[in-house]
Each structure stands twice: as structure tokens, then as C-alpha cells.
Amino acid sequence: MNSALFIIFAFLLLSIYLGIRSTKGKKMSMEQWAVGGRGFGSLFVFLLMAGEIYTTFTFLGASSWAYGKGGPAMYVIMYMSLAYVLGYFVLPMIWKYAKEKNLVSSSDFYESKYKSSFMGVLVAIVGVISTIPYFVLQLKGLGIIVSEASYGTISSGAAIWIGAIAVTVYVMISGIHGSAWTAVIKDFLILGIVVFIGLYIPYHYYGGLGEMFKAVDAAKPGFLAIPEKGLSMSWLISTVLMTVFGFHMWPHAFGGVASARSAKALRKNTIISPIYSLVLLFVFFVGYTAIGQVQGLKGPAADLALLKIATMTFDPWFVGLIGAAGLLAALVPGSMLLMAASTLIAKNVYKTVVPTATDKQVMSLAKYLVPVFALISIYFTFNGGSTIVTLLLMAYSFVTQLAPALYFSLMKNNFVNKYGAGAGMIVGVVIVAYVTATNITMPQIFPSLPQWIQDLNIGVIALLLNIIVTVIVSLVTGKSAATSQGNNETATLQNN
């Protein structure tokens, strides 16, 4: 066993140990399993929610887009910073309502706000549909990272199976507690490694960042600018908007929010996180350096940019540390995703269909669903060819369709009802599903429209139609309900 592989497996075993150890002295009720008994302080909340910044996307997606797309990769920094600004105002409101109503899932929130079990089921289904490609992203990244970092000793397929089994085991045992403790190690390890390689690799090959950027511009003039077509400015703005509004819609993000001890802990998190997200710049630096050092990576192969240049540059033991950081970057968000999906189906679908089910039965079902969702995700991992970034954007297009109903529900005088919220959500999801299934593009739909419209992210188009349908259906059904109530009151007075 080479030193890189030894280090990777050592961190894998450590994560499993922490997952099992974290349950000591705790009675694992649904509330403890899903939201940590709502007792996490600022540090745990920060590290759990920072998992949204540092996933396998950090290592592979960000660097591959810097390597293959250039300037448009900067959308990642933009949307994360803006999402936390929005979260500063929104997350404490969600936390307060969830605590008052004792809610443990995002579906609980919608069901309670709109007083509709149908809304809870619908949100659960949309949440799971969104979660699967996001977890597939983690597994794909895990396979690439472990295979490359072990110098091919472990195949990508074997790494995916090992990682999926590991995360399934510790999610079933410890729930969010294991994720929280593993996140502590993950974030400190990633922070140190990303900053170091982001500075060292450009210096090693070019003598500094300035020379590195000059080399990129000389090799590919205009590569670092936003292009006029395709990934243009309208694509950039629409993609940033879509991801900003969808950022806090993830089912596992609700678990992180609800686990906080106070609203103050959430506000602290949103203040620090935009600065923390700037560390992604160092990943971009590695991707830009790889342009001149690692030739010919096209399509999905571009996801290998960071690992290829790392294995060229560092000794095996340090490559092992990079692989271990990547492994944990997949396991922590992966565990949250599995837990969120299983909780949604058990608590918000099964419990709705079988209202007599006890809390113990719901809890047991949630745990048993974890390996089911893991197997489904493994199937799609081995039967899909999308790049890391493509998978992320597709998942965002789905989950963002939950945003209008949630943001409307936070209004003091919310005119949107369950009919409008549900109809808008369905329209948005159907549009995204159709586009995803048919691979149709905006230029194909609107070939004669201006270029800036053709370049818009389809997720934003679906979101706009979602909002329009939500408002119209709510106004129509709200007016009908008011008219019906008025007619009933009139008839009652006449009868009296």
C-alpha cells in the first residue's frame, strides 16, 4: 500500500469512528438524528453549512471550470457571497419558526406554513429529486479523487462503493452528529491544503500569480474574460440569481439551520462565510496553472485538472492528504444529503400516507431508507456522463423551484395560498425536468430571439414562470374562495 492510499484510508476510518463516537450519551430520537436536538453552537453550525462551500465541487468543479472555461468560473464566488447576504435576513426567520413549531425537515416548514399535507409531500418529492444528482456529484468526485490520489491503486468504481458504504453506515448510526464532527476535521484540512496548493503551485511553475495570469493570457487570449456568446454576461447573471435563491432551499441545508442553538449563531455564520468562500480563489489558481502544465483535458476529463497537476508536483504522502481532504469533502455533504432525503420520505410522505405511524416507526424507516437512496445514487453515478459543474447546475435548477413558496411565506401578509404555491412549483419542476430529459437548449427554443435571451440559464426561465403561475393561481383561487365564503354567508343570513 503506497503512502497516499494509507493516508486516505486512515481518514476514512477516522470519519467512521467519529460518526459512531458522536452518539455517545445521546438518545437518538428523530430530532436528535436529523437536527442534533437543536443544540449546535456557532462553530458546528458554521462548519456544517460551510459544507455547502467545500464539497467535491471545491476540488474538481471549480478547478475544472477555471481550466476549461476561464472567466465564467467566477460565478461560484459571486453566488456564494450573495447567498449569505440573503441568508443573514432569511435564515433566522426560518430557524425561529422551525423552533416554535418543532419542525425537523424542510417539508415540515412548507406543510406548516401553508397548512397543507399536500405541500409537504410535494416539497419532499422535489427535494429528493434535487438531492439525487447532488449526491451523485459527491460520489463522482469521490471516485475521481481517490482513484487519482492513490495513483490508480484504487479504481474509481471501487472508491465510489467504499465511500458510499462508509457514509451510509455512519449516517444510519449517528445522523447529523457524525456529519458535524467529521466537518470539523474536513474544513481545517481543506482550508490548509487549498490555500497552500493555490499559492505554491503557481509559484512553483511560474514564479507567482502575476506571471501565471500572464502565461494564461498568452496561451489563450481573452480566456479570463466573459465571452459574448454562450457563457456570456446574461448567462452569468441569470445563473448567479438562480443559485442565490436556491442556495438555502436544499433539504440538508434546512437541517443545518434547524440544528442551531440560536438565531445569533446563524447570523455569525452568514457574516463569516462570504469571506470563507473567497478561499475558492486558490482552487481557481490551481486550475489556471494547470492550463499550461496539463494538456488536452476535454469535457468530463477537465475535472481531473487539479489532481493531475498535484500528482505531478507533490510527493505521494502530500497527494494522500489532498485525497483525504477530497474524501471528507464528499462524505460530509453526502451524509447530510442522504439524511435529508430519507427524512423527507419517512416523515413527510410515509407519515402522511400512514398517519397512525408512530415516531419510532418513522425513525426506523428513515434509517432504512439511507442505504436505498445510496444505491439509487450509485446507479446514476455509474450511468451518467455529466461533468461535476453540470450536475450541480441541474440540481440547482430543480431545488430553486422551491424558493418562491418559501419567500412568499415569510411575508407578514402572504397572499399566496397552497394552490398557487403548489401549481407554481409543479410548473417550474416540469420545465426543468423536460429540458433535462430532452437536452433542449434556449437557442433551440427561441432561435430568433436576441443572443442575451438565448444565453439565459433555463433554471431562471423556469423560476420566472413558477412565480407568475404562483401569483395568478393564488389570486384566482383566493378570490374564488372569498366569493364562495361571501355567498355562503349571504345564504345563511337569508335563511335566518
Image: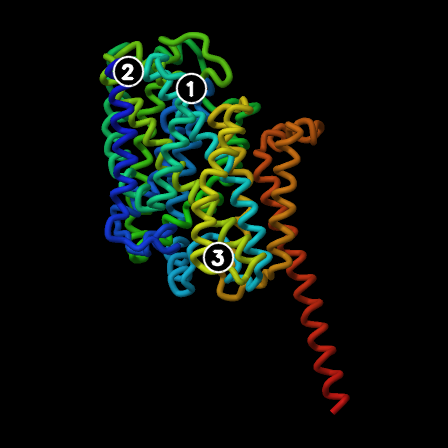
Q: Residue at x 63, y 30 (%)?
A: 454
Q: Helix, strand, or loop for circle 1?
A: helix
Q: Please tell me how crowded label 1 is: few (under 14), some (14-19), or many (20+) other residues with Cα within 10 Å.
A: many
- C-alpha distance separating marks 1 and 2: 28 Å
With respect to residue 369, does 356 lie above or below?
below
Q: Is residue 250 visible?
A: no
Tell me the residue that label 3 is attached to.
108
Residue 21 quadrant: top left
Q: Please tell me how crowded label 2 is: few (under 14), some (14-19), or many (20+) other residues with Cα within 10 Å.
A: many
Residue 302 quadrant: top left
Amino acid type shown at disc 2: Pro
Colouring: rainbow
Q: Earlier in the sequence, mark 1 or mark 2?
A: 1
Residue 365 is left or right of residue 268, and the answer is: right
Tell me the residue that label 1 is attached to.
156
* Residue 307 in the image, given as x and y percentages of width and height: 35, 17
Which label is found at residue 202?
Answer: 2
